[in-house]
Image: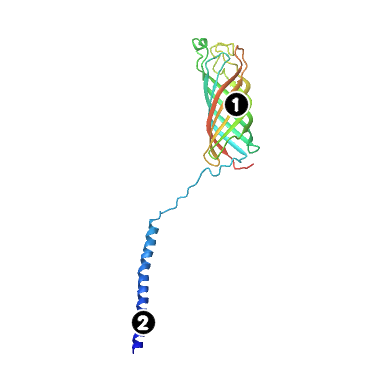
Amino acid sequence: MTRLTLAALAGAVLCWTAVSGNAQASSQTPAAQDSAVQNQQQLPNGTYVSIDPLSGVRYDNRWDVSVGLAFGHIHAGPNIREGADLGGLDVSGSYWLTKHWGLEASGRGYLGSSGTTPSAAGPPYNESGVFVAQYMFLGGVEYLGPHNKHIAVIPHALIGGAYGDFNKELGHAGSTTGPTGIAGFYDNQVALGGAFGGHIDLNRSAHWVFRITPDALLTGYDGTSQYPHTQWQFGISAGVQYKFKGKR
């Protein structure tokens, strides 16, 4: 009888332990699930991915072209000390031979007006603030200097020709034109031209670049003067460049 009683008591203890453990497990499982659901609800609705627009900048393109608004300073005559500030367009293209060396061609047009001599500015000629223009067609070499994905410095040396249109609005009132004329301007002519400076490129993506091009502009217009015919003037342009996909 005693053995049966002890066995019954032991069985009851085991059953109670099992039932208690199952009840505790069942009571903890919903709480853990609720905690997981709550954590999921606290996560942001979307995942934000940071993209670097300059990650594709490689400097391995074969061709590129740029267009910019240009500024140039000139003297319209050999004895005209008052300079003329002209505005226009600068279109350039490059073909890269190696990683650092390339060939560049540039066409530039500058338009504006220039003052004349006091004798031409008054009656009867009234030739003051007359139209002048300068067109430059240049070619040469460029070098890829210090660069990273943000910026590049590209010096260049370009040489070619410059056409000066100086007499378009002169001579209508009977005045003579040319350096010995009353206005003192050069004759219309083609002369030596050059641009020595370079590009400052600010990359906006793998293909698009904001470009600034400061240059020392060289012209060699012919005219009778006590001053040298060779002129060095400042010029600058700002615009955009596009790099084509072809790789060298």
Q: Where on the picture, by quarter, is residue 57?
A: top right
Question: Secondary structure under badge 1?
Answer: strand
The figure's colour scheme reads rainbow
Q: On the rendered structure, is 1 left or right of 208?
A: left
Which residue in the structure is indicated by mark 2? 10
Please name the residue shown 39% across and 58% down the image.
39
The quadrant of the picture occupied by the C terminus is top right
Image spot of residue 223 (x, y percent)? 61, 14
- Within 10 angstroms of label 2, few (less than 14), some, or many (20 or more) residues? few
* 104 shown above or below 220: below
Q: Earlier in the sequence, mark 2 or mark 1?
A: 2
Q: Residue furthest bottom?
A: 1
Q: Residue furthest right?
A: 97
Q: Nearer the viewer, residue 171 or 94?
A: 94
Amino acid type shown at disc 1: Ala
The quadrant of the picture occupied by the N terminus is bottom left
Q: Where on the picture, by quarter, is residue 176?
A: top right
Question: Secondary structure under badge 2?
Answer: helix
Count of numbered badges drawn on the protein: 2
Amino acid type shown at disc 2: Ala
Q: Nearer the viewer, residue 219 or 145?
A: 145
Q: On the rendered structure, is 204 left or right of 35?
A: right
Spatial separation of the CA atoms under disc 2 and disc 1: 106 Å
Q: Where on the picture, by quarter, is residue 207?
A: top right
* 18 shown above or below 188: below
Which residue in the structure is indicated by mark 1? 195
Q: On the rendered structure, is 93 left or right of 47?
A: right
